[in-house]
Amino acid sequence: MVRVVATMAADEIVFDAAERMEKAVQILKQSLAGIRTGRANPGLVDTLRVDAYGASTPIKQLATVGAPEPTQIVIRPYDPGTLKDIEKAIIASDLGFNPQNDGRLIRINVPPLSNEQRKKMVGRIKELAEEAKIAIRSIRRDANKALDQAEKAKEISEDERDSLKDDIQEATKKYEAQATELAKVREQEVMD
């Protein structure tokens, strides 16, 4: 009976590691959405926080954001009173956009990227992908360490430990490949 409980704990180590690796890939996906390509994309302003109602609020909670044209982002606040706050947040951000406020909504014209800007963006994409891969490998290391401790404590056998380590290695390869693929797709979008 004790062996079954211990094995479940070992399986939980693998499950937890895979779950955390998945989260690292999701964080990468969100980070990549905020990187500018040659086209307007609502994801460019998704991470923007606006000081409204006395609190720092994500823009998604204050307005709908859309890209009706390839070179324009339109922000339509739910409450027209937050228009100025949203405009200030865009100007204060490091996005480099010049918002145009017409009293009802904000339009942001997204200028085309120069080759130098595109290369910088690709470099940033590679950095983000590498950070995600490092996080994934760190999760693998922690999980392997936990399995080694479980084996030392005689909770699992050496063969079980090795088998579970193989599972963790498979998960590592899978999520690193996903991170690489996400980065490759985003680089292609930036260079087009």
Image: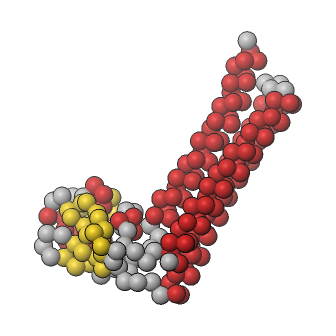
As drawn, 26 above or below 14: below
Q: Would residue 189 appear left or right of 72 to someone viewing this image?
A: right
Q: Which residue is situated farthest in the right direction here?
A: 158
Q: Position of residue 156 (x, y in %)?
A: 80, 26
For the point 69% across and 45% down, which residue is it?
171
Whether residue 30 is visible here, answered yes or no, is yes
Q: Position of residue 152 (x, y in %)?
A: 84, 31
Q: Would residue 118 appear left or right of 142 to someone viewing this image?
A: left
Q: Position of residue 63 (x, y in %)?
A: 24, 60
As drawn, 98 above or below 178: below
Q: Position of residue 165 (x, y in %)?
A: 78, 39
Q: Which residue is situated farthest in the top direction here?
A: 1
Q: Would residue 139 appear left or right of 109 to someone viewing this image?
A: right
Q: Tell me, what colour scheme is on the image?
A: secondary structure
Q: Would residue 36 appear left or right of 51 to someone viewing this image?
A: right
**Where on the picture, by quarter, is residue 126?**
bottom right
For the point 45% across and 83% down, which residue is it?
113
Query: How many numbered marks have been drawn onto this rendered protein structure?
Result: 0
Looking at the picture, tell me which residue is in the foreground, 66 or 168: 66
As drawn, 169 above or below 135: above
Whether residue 147 is visible here, answered yes or no, is no
